[in-house]
Amino acid sequence: MNQSEKKPILVVGAGIAGLSAALRLSKSGHQVQVLDQNWMVGGCAGTYLRKHHLYESGATTLVGMEEFMPLGMIVRETGLDIQPIHLEIPMQIHFPNNRILTRYESLDQWIDEAEGFFGFKQAAFWKQAYTLADTVWRASTKYLDFPPANLSEAFSSMLKFKPADWQVLRKALISTNQWMKNQGMPLQGDFADFVDAQLLITAQSNAQQTNAAFGAAALAYPLFPNYYLPGGIGKLAQAMADLALKNGAQIQLRTAVQSIKKIGSAYEIQSNDQVWHADQVVSAIPVNNLIDLLGQRPAGIRDLRTESSLWSAFQTSFSVRQALPFQALHHQLHCERPIPHLAGKTLFVSFSHPNDSERAPDGSLVVSVSAHLDLSKPWNSEYKAEVEAEILIQLRERGFLVAQPDYVHSAAVGSWQKWTGRAFGAVGGYPQLNGLKPWQMNNAASGWPGLWLAGDTVYPGQGIPGAALSGWIAANRCLAALG
Ligand SMILES: Cc1cc2nc3c(=O)[nH]c(=O)nc-3n(C[C@H](O)[C@H](O)[C@H](O)COP(=O)(O)OP(=O)(O)OC[C@H]3O[C@@H](n4cnc5c(N)ncnc54)[C@H](O)[C@@H]3O)c2cc1C
């Protein structure tokens, strides 16, 4: 047995990315030690209990479960057991004056709805968006060494490319705006606002900044099956953790890593209560956090964003005893007037499933409302009460809230710092920027032997499926290095 087999592989972070890496590594028979600073697993995709109700820490929507998508691949490869409910209607968009646009999963039904709502032909645009998105999803689980760490990897990836993949690559070179213009779509008005708002919650950016390949995948998000997890989104992280434990992994919570030192070809990891030694480390925390822990920046981290270019989130949660007010569980609300201190003009509102008695045993609904918070602007925790009050007023005005909410509580920058330990309280991963091509993004290779990168600041890293895939890719690279 060589040295690498004796020492456990250390995974920092038990969010979706860290757990995905731990699953892959433990499934391959390696000893794995996961450390997380929080008291529960899941990070930004966790579910916590308060006053007999289960609340979401961040994420509420779930895609990526089909067999050619990241979570589908992980389920297939590991036997992960989760029981999602397919949502007939993934999302509804609420424009001012009570105009509701329903995002149907069926492409034909959605095209009819969108053409009727916006009043112009869009079939070719949406068909192309769907085809591009389908290719992007399939490519994501096919090219597990993307983005390439060096020229030789780039060359071997390209040899495997199919014609549809080249189409996607070409779209990665132009902005979503440019692609919309080429397709004769308007760049102003309700349609453009709708596109920007949808991109904000998927790409964390807008049509000007997001490349068209990613933009298409983001816009077509509701055209692929969306799911609900009874008991909360945190059931995914819990199922991943349970399976990793069953495979022999160890998960230690309430254990914050304070520094990582490279000593020769190995690593010394100092946590709040212990020193750990490992030859292989998967860092499943944001790269900004990792650099703090290392005290320097490994050469492989090519894309490092500053606080002012990242988002935090404002999240208000409550339970309410009322019927589901609309057809869907998930809604994007275009506000009739801006909410003070928040970025963008929309709120994202998710209801628990009315039959989910595990989340709300008293027949009530649990509601999560989130919005982007611009870290380039000063935030003061004293704003919290003002923002929360205005959110509740607007929810009432727009028919989301018809009864008295119970246990209203909100999270902002400081809450994210505490809950996830994330630098600056920045969440949602790195925004997609058109200037940054996919092959320039951070990938799993840190540039330091034995140190692998995962999480939503590393390719592809957007949302739960992206974070899960990034962990899987990091584990793959680690396994390849171990031979
Ligand atoms: C408000 C909000 C809404 C969202 N909505 C959706 C959605 O609807 N659908 C979707 O797919 N995605 C959504 N996302 C995005 C998605 O939740 C995240 O991208 C994903 O969960 C990130 O996973 P991660 O493992 O990369 O990071 P994290 O979830 O941040 O996990 C990192 C883990 O590392 C731990 N950690 C940090 N520092 C240390 C340290 N020094 N030592 C030990 N442990 C440490 C943290 O405690 C945490 O558990 C949303 C995010 C937010 C914030």
Image (tube, rainbow, N blue to C red):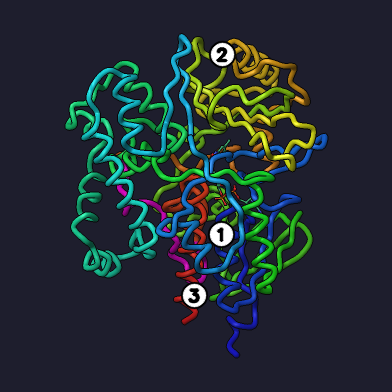
Tag 2: amino acid: Arg
Whole-percent x, y for residue 54 in the image: 73, 39
In the picture, the quarter occupied by the N terminus is bottom right
Magenta part of the protein: which range?
Answer: 435-452
Q: Relative to the observer, which residue lies in front, 31 or 217?
A: 217
Which residue in the structure is indicated by mark 1? Answer: 283
Type of amino acid at the residue the image marks with label 1? Ser
**Upstream in sequence: badge 3 or badge 2:** 2
Q: Residue furthest bottom?
A: 1
* Residue designated by label 3: 479
At which x and y percent is residue 295? 57, 55
Q: Residues within 10 Å of mark 3 (few under 14, many from 20)?
A: some
Q: Nearer the viewer, residue 356 or 154?
A: 356
Q: On residue 333, which mark appears?
A: none
Q: Is residue 362 above or below residue 449?
A: above
Picture layout, residue 220 above or below residue 23: above
